[in-house]
Amino acid sequence: MPQYAVIIHSPAPADPMDLTPDYLALLEGYGQKVAELGGTIVTGFGLQPSTTATSIRGDVVTDGPFTEAKEVVAGFFILEAPDLDVALAVAKANPACIDGGVEVRPLFTPPAE
């Protein structure tokens, strides 16, 4: 079954300790919603706030995210879904769409030799 990276964007600095009880309640029900839509979350990770990032460009190492932005990557998960339509339905149901956004990208599969 195809797999998709679902990348969660949230307002900077996207500190997971700032999530409200209402938002956490939405997240708790999300797994069931994913299953109802026909997908399966394979694995997922939240990230520390963007203020903890370290960026490397060539030989230069700097504190902070790669670019300054109003929204930053807050986490991601790998979704298994029968097709892109299901993956997009799962992404649209994600609570991050309320005040941030969600990006869906198919995972790369090398061509058979």
Image (cartoon, helix red, strand yellow):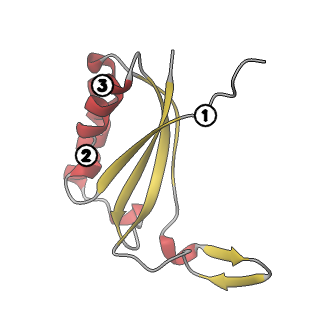
Q: Name the one closer to the observer, 44 or 60.
A: 60
- How crowded pointer 2 is (Cα within 10 Å; few <14, some 14-19, many 20+) is rated as some
Look at the numbered disc 2 and give the secondary structure of its residue: helix
From the viewer's perspective, tell me whether residue 91 is left or right of residue 48. left
Could you tell me which residue is drawn at 74 percent across and 84 percent down?
60
Q: Quadrant of residue 94?
A: top left
Could you say where residue 93 lies in the image, as x and y percent from the top left?
23, 36
Could you tell me which residue is drawn at 47 percent across and 52 percent down?
75
The residue labelled by disc 3 is 85
Q: CA distance from mark 2 to mark 1?
A: 26 Å
Look at the numbered disc 1 and give the secondary structure of its residue: loop
With respect to residue 94, does 50 lie above or below?
A: below
- How crowded pointer 3 is (Cα within 10 Å; few <14, some 14-19, many 20+) is rated as few
From the viewer's perspective, tell me whether residue 23 is left or right of residue 15. left
Find residue 95 and name its label. 2
With respect to residue 12, does 47 lie above or below?
A: above
Could you tell me which residue is drawn at 48 percent across and 46 percent down?
76
**Badge 3 or badge 2: first in the primary sequence:** 3
The residue labelled by disc 1 is 108
Look at the numbered disc 3 and give the secondary structure of its residue: helix
Could you say where residue 21 lies in the image, as x and y percent from the top left?
24, 53
With respect to residue 24, does 11 lie above or below?
A: below
Give the quadrant of the C terminus: top right
